[in-house]
Image (spheres, rainbow, N blue to C red):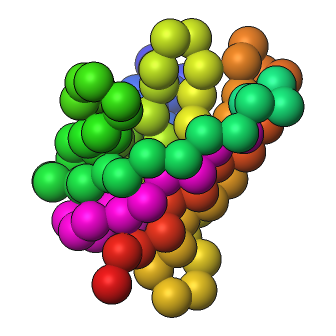
Amino acid sequence: MKNRIRAAAAGLAVGAVALTGTAISGGEAAAKVPSRNYTWYGNSLGTPSQAPATVRGNTLIIYAPGSKQFYRIVPTRSGGYFDAMGTRYILHKRARGVLSGPAQWGGLVIGNNKLVPRR
């Protein structure tokens, strides 16, 4: 009987600590990509590209020749990322408002990308 009481008390203590830790820690800190006008520079598989771009909230709009392309930015601690046609574009905050990082396809780095603020 003593062992059952000890096991129950230990279980309650572990559960209380786990719940307290969850309530205190909260979610991951998010560094939102600032809403403004940018120039997009990309280089995937050796093919360079450049286009005007705008960030509004968590939406990246790239003004490609003849169309607008809309992508949802997922905020992370260091900036954000977005996925396009199987490629993940990672954006880390850098100096002077620049965001840059690798372009990955299936975990392999296939190029790089950069958002530079237009002034």
Question: In the rendered image, which quarter is residue 110 located in?
Answer: top right
State the residue lying farthest toward the left: 57
Residue 35 highlighted magenta (yes or no): yes
Please indicate, yes or no, whether residue 97 appears anywhere in the rendered image: yes
Question: In the rendered image, which quarter is residue 71 located in?
Answer: top left
Residue at 51% in and 88% down: 96
Relative placement, left or right, of 43 versus 49 is right
Q: Nearer the viewer, residue 117 or 91?
A: 117
Relative placement, left or right, of 39 versus 88 is left
Please indicate, yes or no, whether residue 17 appears anywhere in the rendered image: no
> In the picture, which quadrant includes the C terminus?
bottom left
Residue at 61% in and 40% down: 49
- Above or below, 108 against 85 in this view is below
Residue at 36% in and 32% down: 64
Tally of marks: 0
* Percent x, y of residue 23: 25, 55
Q: Nearer the viewer, residue 50 or 35?
A: 50
Q: Nearer the viewer, residue 44 or 48?
A: 48
Residue 31 highlighted magenta (yes or no): yes
> Which region is colored magenta?
30-43
* Percent x, y of residue 92: 58, 61
* Percent x, y of residue 21: 38, 55
Q: Nearer the viewer, residue 14 or 54?
A: 54
- Above or below, 42 against 7 in this view is below
* Percent x, y of residue 15: 37, 38
Residue at 27% in and 65% down: 37
Relative placement, left or right, of 12 versus 51 is left
